[in-house]
Image (spheres, rainbow, N blue to C red):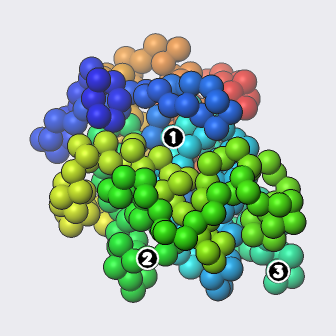
Amino acid sequence: MDSLGEKDNFVQNAGVIMAIVKAIVREMPDGSARRVFPFHLSLEGLEKAIICRDEDDYDILVKYLFICALNKNVIVATYIVVSNHLHVVLLAEDDKQAMEYGCEVRRRYAMWFSRRYNERILYHNRCVDVRLLDTYWYARNAIAYVFRNALDNGSSIDSYPWSGYRAVFCNGRCAAATRPVSSLTKRERETIFHTNDIISTSGWLIDDTGRLEPASACDWKYVESAFDNSQAFLFKIIGEVNVSQMQQELVDGPRTKMLDGEFFKMISSVSDRWFGKPVSQLTLTEKMRMIPYISRTTNTTVPQLARGFGLERDEVADIIRKNR
């Protein structure tokens, strides 16, 4: 068993051998044991619109990340919220579940924003982007990229208040003055979390200002295991992460409409990572596994999917419809 999960396949990218991430077993918010995968999720406003105007906005958006995780039965490994976007590394059963979680975060926060400012948040048509972190290299670099965002917002990584970084390499310890969420009254829960959801069984802690303590809510053990339980290794990857590459891979790429040639290269790369063979050699069953993922995470169309996978348009549309 690898520190990030099971592994038995490898791919080569730019001369580097990378192990493929397989499922790991986690106890989910509903108490069941599930096989889950790591995903990166990003959300931003139209043309980088400001979505967090003050500390109350940051605070409630962080809390919604975890309330929605409870409701959608997924796990937040780590996160960062900045003024115009957010990143989450999520453990979910599949990309559909991860996308549903992201859409729920968007819906809830849009309601908060509308009530508070009497304005609508202007979102991209595809403002929620989900990417399966299908190799150990991607998982580690995505986590490092998430933490690295604090530097771009004028803070040090360890002092930025709206990040899950404070949960790692502290043995799960929180600030001295904390209070369990289970002790909140209904009125306190509504005031502090702005929700009527049942969160008393979450195990979360809040500090003396009412902010959620990330060490009580994040799956920090997963993040630490991603770096072989070495903080020095994490710092090394943070220092080496190619920010431009991660931005393109995780955020910009899914929003860009690709020409057929670029699209085919992209699905070929995914096919190699998932199945170890080119798209032309995929079975229909394998294509049926890939198409819904590519459809949800890439700015593409049914005709382009049909051309790329060598299927009829009606076949592709039916695969997408059945998956939904």
Q: CA distance from mark 2 to mark 1?
A: 23 Å
Q: Using the numbered discs, state the Cα–Cα distance from disc 2 to disc 3 in whole angstroms.
A: 25 Å
* Camera-nearest residue between 264 and 142: 142
In the rendered view, does 42 fall on the left or right side of 278?
A: right
Residue closest to the eye, 181 or 253: 181
| In the image: residue 8, left or right of residue 215 | left
| Residue 324, image x, y percentages | 73, 32
The residue tagged 3 is: 116
Name the residue beneath numbered marker 1: 91
Which label's residue is closer to the chain start, 2 or 1?
1
Q: Quadrant of residue 187?
A: bottom right
Residue visible at 72% across and 24% down in the picture = 322
Which amino acid type corresponds to the residue marked 1 in the rendered image? Leu
Image: 222 above or below 195: above
Q: Quadrant of the N terminus?
A: top left
Q: Is residue 305 above or below residue 46?
A: above
Q: Which residue is mark 2?
A: 160
Q: Amino acid at mark 2?
A: Tyr
Q: Secondary structure at mark 1?
A: strand
Residue 1, compared with residue 16, is above or below; it is above
Mark 1–mark 3 distance (CA, rounded to whole Å): 31 Å
Q: Amino acid at mark 3?
A: Arg
Q: Are marks 1 and 3 in contact (CB under 8 Å)?
A: no
Q: Nearer the viewer, mark 2 or mark 3?
A: 2
**Who is closer to the viewer here, 130 or 264?**
130
Report the residue at 59% width, 70% height from top.
207
Dot in front, 2 or 1: 2
The crowding category of the residue bearing disc 2, from other C-alpha atoms within 10 Å (few below 14, some 14 to 19, many at least 20), is many
